[in-house]
Amino acid sequence: MSFWLVVVAVVAGWYLLRPTGFGSGQYLGEVAGVLAVTFLSASLVLAMRLAVVERAFDGLDRMYVWHRWIATSGVLLFVPHILLVGGRDSATPDPTSPASAPRYGIGNNLGIISIIGLGVLVAAAFLPRIPVVRRIVRLGYEKWLGSHRFAGLFVAAAVAHGLLVDPVIRASAALWWIYLAIGAVGIGAFVARQVGDLRGWGRADYVVAEAERLNSTTLEVRLRPVRRHIDFVAGQFVYASFGGPAYWQPHPFTVSNAPGESELRLSIKATGDYTAGLYEHLRRGAGATVEGPYGGFDQRIGGPRQVWIAGGIGITPFLSWANALDPETAPQVELFYAVADTDHALYVDELTDAVHRVPSLRLHVSVDDRDGFLSIERIARTTPHDLQECMFFMCGPGGMIRAFDRDLRERGVAASQIHYEEFSFR
């Protein structure tokens, strides 16, 4: 809501403070450029992972979805900006304006650099989601994250471009300062995030107490705090980096043990170069840092009848939930755990112990090569309650989540009864 109020305020400001001497087409083009910078600055603020902002979005995964769409919208707003602006400034700059004479050479070059750079970053975020492209272009999380560290530089170039060449801004001191403030917020957020990563702000030091390979792809890591420990709610995740506080690439991992324990347990599947490297090389005694916790995936918002659906390594938040349930107050829970084969059915013994401790919890393990793919139809047959009376929580691969979400809605389950955690922040 705050973001849209800022957008409305920017549009209103550019309407009320419009200088004379500009055609409507050119002026709309300049407004589009200002809105592009506003959107991009907001996306950099969201990338800071501030706890107060995360709470407003009900979880970091949701916040990053908004970050992606706001940033993309900002880049797309450059299209009308380019198409509508043109010509030289026909207005006389306000003598009180802090702007100097236009510098079209360097200013236009900065604008071109910004548009090309941000366009490449947007393409890197969305093109790998297209199946045909994904088979040709493989961009690992590490390379994607590294490339996005240039985002703030490209936004800074866009801000400088506007200050140097935008005739509307140069014609009004008020608009010049408003635009500068918008850009400064975004650039300041970017600088703070980079310095924080380098300095380890908001992170707690840990050490690897255990690193056990559970199967051919999954590593279980137990982290012991060096000084202070991270307090978390069951189902939340943290950003962990291994190798010391200055390590450049923290990665998100769900905490799979219950709150209140002195150690953190992370269950890590080797799906990329970084996690595959952890699987092969991480050993007891390695240093680590942890930032967080994050996430609003919380079964306590559910009612008395709940259905939990986990796909593969998506079992991790449900492990934490099951271990944290109070037998006296726990809701009726049907936990469906879908895996490709028995080798990937991890933590079944631990979940079985939770079932014995909590009578209202029931476990259903579905193995694809034995039982076929888990479906909403099978869930409906197994669950003792009408699906429309249940609250659904899902975590797993994106394709599974989208299919189940669609099938549940077709069966009359309201969107407000379906909760899931985004598996990818790209």
Image (cartoon, rainbow, N blue to C red):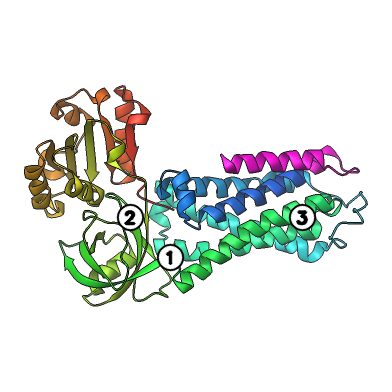
SS for callout 1: loop
The disc placed on residue 426 is: none
Which amino acid type is marked by label 2?
Phe
Does label 3 or label 1 sit earlier along the sequence? 3
* Residue 126 seen in the figure: no
SS for callout 2: strand
Task: Please provide percent x and percent y for residue 282.
Answer: 25, 73
Q: Find out whether residue 5 is within the magenta segment.
A: yes
* Residue 168 seen in the figure: yes
Residue 274 lies left or right of residue 269; in this view the side is: right
The residue that mark 3 highlights is: 177
The disc placed on residue 237 is: 2
Which stretch appears magenta?
1-27
SS for callout 3: helix
Q: Are marks 3 and 2 in contact (CB under 8 Å)?
A: no
The residue that mark 1 highlights is: 202
Relative depth, front residue between 322 and 253: 322
Q: For mark 1, does the 10 Å Cα neighbourhood hold few (<14), some (14 to 19), or many (20 or more) residues?
A: few
Q: Residue furthest left?
A: 356
Q: CA distance from mark 2 to mark 1?
A: 15 Å
x 49%, y 68%: residue: 196
Does label 2 or label 1 sit earlier along the sequence? 1
Residue 389 lies left or right of residue 144; in this view the side is: left
x 73%, y 63%: residue: 109
The vertical placement of 355 against 219, above or below, is: above
Which amino acid type is marked by label 3?
Trp
Q: Residue 222 occupies which quadrant of the picture?
A: bottom left
Task: Please provide percent x and percent y for residue 281.
Answer: 25, 74
Select label 3 or label 1 by which is in front. 1
Q: CA distance from mark 3 to mark 2?
A: 40 Å
Task: Please provide percent x and percent y for residue 158.
Answer: 68, 58
Residue 324 lies left or right of residue 354; in this view the side is: right
